[in-house]
Image: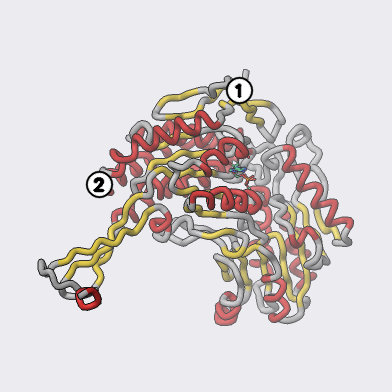
Amino acid sequence: MAEEYKALIGGEWVGSTTGETMDVVNPATGDVVAKVAKCGTAEVDRAVQAARKAGPGWASKTVAERSKVLLNLSRIIMEHHEELAKLETLEHGSPIRKTMNFDVPLCAEQFEYFAGIARAMTGETLPVGPWCTSMTVREPLGVVALITPWNFPALMVVWKLGAALVTGNTCVVKPPSIAPLTTLKLVELAMEAGVPAGVVNVVTGPGETVGEALVSHPDVAKVGFTGDTATGKRIMSIASANVKQVGLELGGKNAFVVLPDADVDSAAEGAVWAAFFNSGQVCAAASRFYIHESIYDEFAEKMVALAVTLRVGDPRKMETVIGPLAYKEHRDKVEWYIESGRKSGAKLLLGGQRPDTDETRKGFFVAPTIFGDCRNDMEVMREEIFGPVAGLARFKTEEEAIGLVNDTPYGLSASLWTKDVRKGLALAGRINAGTVWINEHLIIFCDTPWGGCKQSGWGKDLSKMVLDEYTMTKHIYIDLTGERVKPWYGLLK
Ligand code: NDP
């Protein structure tokens, strides 16, 4: 019997007014494992009003008080480490070795990080003149809507929630419909940690209704969104109606460039990590690989030899590295791109099919797939596939490599592999992307800003830059002369 989950509004667990629910499916087996309230616009409005009501109380707490709540939450998350990890594995199919060792500890660490950086948040005094004090103060924005994707269900909400809460905002979260359970568990723990009723609300339901109602709601001050570029464009257009702030962390088609002097073993290992971690369902996953022609064959051979050893199977087993894709339609889409790669003349070096074992037969699995001899005009090299599919292409000159890397509407991340770090640094400056790694790929810290350019969005998650995303800087000017003669006096009299 599938467990029923409700939305959280004003500290109360509530079903949808229509009584409708949505199924949550375990992608490793295809079984329905939970039913979640399918909310609509009425619940969105109630949640926004609850967040508005809770706003002044939460904003008037000191940063130190809010930080303490986040530190509590961080500790409580680790007390529920295994439970949260199993829940994410269940709803998303992420292998348990990843959810136990990566997602849950990182969620705890990130709340700690936000609790810490907020204590160092300051305004400025500005040297306008001796006759005044001119200063800036930071204020919360008010009610913020946080709309999150399914690829790291827990982490993606924590990135936004930690920053929004510690800066004094109240939140309405819209989690991904296919994987909302970890978000619901996290907010239950947030209340246990001392987050007051109404400060965080969660409205489960479809993006087209619940998401859009949040984006267009006049009492929502900002939308923090992570998801598909097409959805980001739609959100921008709706938000423009009332000039609402939006933060957009969107898609990517991330390049991995191996220069002729690179350590090929290290680059091949990095490539397997970058392409196949989380079954490639990572905004920063490398999916187009440009390898200097002098080392292409050696690199391709080594990458394939390493990828073939990745264990694909039951995500509940600690030895599994590659789980299923998160839902059936997504698996079908990834397979469509694999077919497109075949048809376009790319050479299939590995995978390309569903693994057929007792552990995988019922779920939405796709084997790690590597295409060689790719060209930049092929769909596998242009579109964000968001699955375990890598395309390899040769280049002759650095100039050509940089041209290929920048030949995309996206600008999220890229990596360069070379022993010549000075050259790497010079080339990094020519790549249009929010992050460029040198001799590394897909490594993200709380301390470092995350966010892209071009159609990968704008704004930053993580790092101290995120404080700017969730606060308004207000300028306050105080006349100190006490006299009637003001700087503008001569212009008037
Ligand atoms: P979607 O854009 O489909 O969904 C993201 C969220 O938006 C979901 O909660 C979804 O709800 C909601 N949504 C859908 N339509 C609307 C709408 N019209 N108005 C408001 N909200 C809406 O993305 P995915 O969940 O498929 O996530 C994958 C994408 O996220 C990839 O493109 C990936 O690159 C990107 N991503 C980017 C990251 C970054 O840092 N740049 C990090 C992680 C992912 P529902 O689930 O109900 O459809």
- Identified at 38% across, 33% down, the residue is 198
From the Cβ of disc 1, is ligand 1 less than 8 Å away? no
Question: In the image, which disc is placed on residue 20?
Answer: 1
Q: Rate crowding at label 2 as few (under 14), some (14 to 19) or many (20 or more) other CA atoms within 10 Å.
A: few
Instruction: Report x, y in % for residue 468.
Output: 40, 58
Q: Nearer the viewer, mark 2 or mark 1?
A: 1
Name the amino acid, label 1: Glu
Give the vertical position of 14 relative to 156 (above or below).
above
Give the vertical position of 130 relative to 16 (above or below).
below
- Mark 2 to mark 1: distance in Å? 40 Å
- Identified at 68% across, 53% down, the residue is 276
Give the vertical position of 486 relative to 100 (above or below).
below
Q: Is residue 394 left or right of residue 479?
A: right
Name the amino acid, label 2: Thr
According to the picture, the residue beneath numbered tag 2 turns out to be 62
First of labels 2, 1 by sequence position:
1
Frontmost residue, 100 versus 352: 352
Frontmost residue, 24 versus 17: 17
Instruction: Report x, y in % for residue 13.
Output: 46, 24
Task: Determine which quarter of the picture holds residue 87.
Answer: top right
Frontmost residue, 464 versus 454: 454
Q: Rate crowding at label 1 as few (under 14), some (14 to 19) or many (20 or more) other CA atoms within 10 Å.
A: some
Instruction: Report x, y in % for residue 271.
Output: 67, 62
Question: In the image, which disc is placed on residue 184?
Answer: none
Q: Residue furthest left?
A: 482
Task: Determine which quarter of the picture holds residue 206.
Answer: top right
Could you say whether the residue bearing mark 1 is in a helix, strand or loop?
loop
